[in-house]
């Protein structure tokens, strides 16, 4: 068991420097310009997406009453080394040890992903009765389409890079029982036209649609974020909710010293792939209004964590990472 744990941590720790930042390769900062291309041209799924799945899988190993987010499917998408960790984490002391190693190496990442998963889950469930479609951009190994009540009553479009999507479909074959309500739309942002591909896939631009754009804007440049909001403005019916995440720009420029941010930025610097885009929280309402959206709420994941975690087990969670709910006007 000790050997298994040591090997698992060793294997996984090779990935850890890149946690949440592996989405860029070749130092190219723009999501829409295809920075994951090198990995994905080689047919590899996004590692960031797998890492997020690891955090959710570890959380799923907690006993039900203590679980902050509940994603029992996450484990199915893990790489062999991450799956080993998830298996070891069935033993509570080992799970705590694994989480401790991850949190020490990469403060904020795990707790931030778990807290935002819960916040977004609750928001999606609340919005679903008012929409006819759901559009998940950069879906990765998001399993909300399969595990959240109400999802089966809407048409779901999962948009992602073909390489990540292929890995997901390996686990969840299209047209299977679980995926009957889901249309997978492979799109390479920066190369393909998402509006055209969605239209071909049967997406209805007049229908009220719930959009989820999680874990992506911090890897983009401002032009790419702008282009995506432009696309959403033209593709969404009035009243459509758009949920997205961003990092506080003050974390990027160092003007505010957020707990965990320095370690995060150093780690990012080590791999030569810093966060490239953030909003100042007070500019978000006007930014959205100028692009045809109104802000509903903007919550730092640290606040979400305080709401969801019991105080004695709350991990370090970033105050600079935000979840926003907005609505197409
Ligand atoms: C950081 S992961 C987020 C995954 C998921 N939303 C989450 O929060 O766990 C980014 C996602 O964007 C996708 N992606 C990266 N580059 C892309 C590109 N050029 N075109 C389309 N999708 C891309 C990856 O496949 C991955 O699923």
Image (cartoon, grey):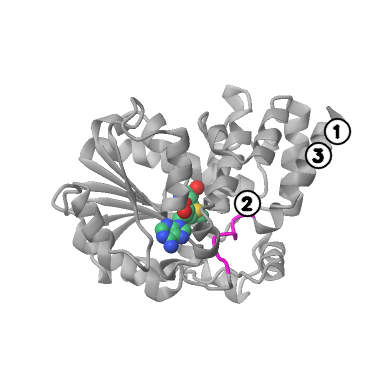
Decide which of 95, 10 is in the foreground and name it. 10
In what quadrant of the picture does the C terminus appear?
A: bottom left
Q: Write the residue at 68% across / 29% down.
A: 87
> Is 24 within the magenta?
yes
Q: Is residue 197 visible?
A: yes
Residue 7's mark? Answer: 3
Residue 3's mark? Answer: 1
Looking at the image, do the residues carrying marks 3 and 1 touch, with CB atoms under 8 Å apart?
Answer: yes
Q: What number of labels is visible? A: 3
Residue 173's mark? Answer: none
Mark nearer the viewer, 2 or 1:
1
Magenta-colored span: 19-25
Coordinates of residue 140 in the picture (x, y in percent): 46, 47
Q: Is residue 319 left or right of residue 229?
A: right
Mark nearer the viewer, 2 or 3:
3
Disc 2 marks which residue? 109
* Disc 2 residue crowd, few under 14, some 14–19, many 20+, Cα 10 Å: many
Q: Write the residue at 43% across / 43% down.
A: 120
Reply above or below: 37 against 54.
Answer: below
Callout 3: CB less than 8 Å from ligand 1: no
By secondary structure, the bulk of the magenta-drawn segment is best described as loop
Coordinates of residue 262 in the picture (x, y in percent): 70, 66
Coordinates of residue 189 in the picture (x, y in percent): 37, 63
In what quadrant of the picture does the N terminus appear?
A: top right
- Who comes first in sequence, dot 2 or dot 1? 1
User: Circle 3 — which element?
Assistant: helix
Decide which of 326, 149 is in the foreground and name it. 149
> Is 97 within the magenta?
no
Reply above or below: 88 against 133.
Answer: above
Gap in angstroms between the C-alphas marked 3 and 1: 6 Å
Gap in angstroms between the C-alphas marked 2 and 1: 26 Å
């Amino acid at each position: 068991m000790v050997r298994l744990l040591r090997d698992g941590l060793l294997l996984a720790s090779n990935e850890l420097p890149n946690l949440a930042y592996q989405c860029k390769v070749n130092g190219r900062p723009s999501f829409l310009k295809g920075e994951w291309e090198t990995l994905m041209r080689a047919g590899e799924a996004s590692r960031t997406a797998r890492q997020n799945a690891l955090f959710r899988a570890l959380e799923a190993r907690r006993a039900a009453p203590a679980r902050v987010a509940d994603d029992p499917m996450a484990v199915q998408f893990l790489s062999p080394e991450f799956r080993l960790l998830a298996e070891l984490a069935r033993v509570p002391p080992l799970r705590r040890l694994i989480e401790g190693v991850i949190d020490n190496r990469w403060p904020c990442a795990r707790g931030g992903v778990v807290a935002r998963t819960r916040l977004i889950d609750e928001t999606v469930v609340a919005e679903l009765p008012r929409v006819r479609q759901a559009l998940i951009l950069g879906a990765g190994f998001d399993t909300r389409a399969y595990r959240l009540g109400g999802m089966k009553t809407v048409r779901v479009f999962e948009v992602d890079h073909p390489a990540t999507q292929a890995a997901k479909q390996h686990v969840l074959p299209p047209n299977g029982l679980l995926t009957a309500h889901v249309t997978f739309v492979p799109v390479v942002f920066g190369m393909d036209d998402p509006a055209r591909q969605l239209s071909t896939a049967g997406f209805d631009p007049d229908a009220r649609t719930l959009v989820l754009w999680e874990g992506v804007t911090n890897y983009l440049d401002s032009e790419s974020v702008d282009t995506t909001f432009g696309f959403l403005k033209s593709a969404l019916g009035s009243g459509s909710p758009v949920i997205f995440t961003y990092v506080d720009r003050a974390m990027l420029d160092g003007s505010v010293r957020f707990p965990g941010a320095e370690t995060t930025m150093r780690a990012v610097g080590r791999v030569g792939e810093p966060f490239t885009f953030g909003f100042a929280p007070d500019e978000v309402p006007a930014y959205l209004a100028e692009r045809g959206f109104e802000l509903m709420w903007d919550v730092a994941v640290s606040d979400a964590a305080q709401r969801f975690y019991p105080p004695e087990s709350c991990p370090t969670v970033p105050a600079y990472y935000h979840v926003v709910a907005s609505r197409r006007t």
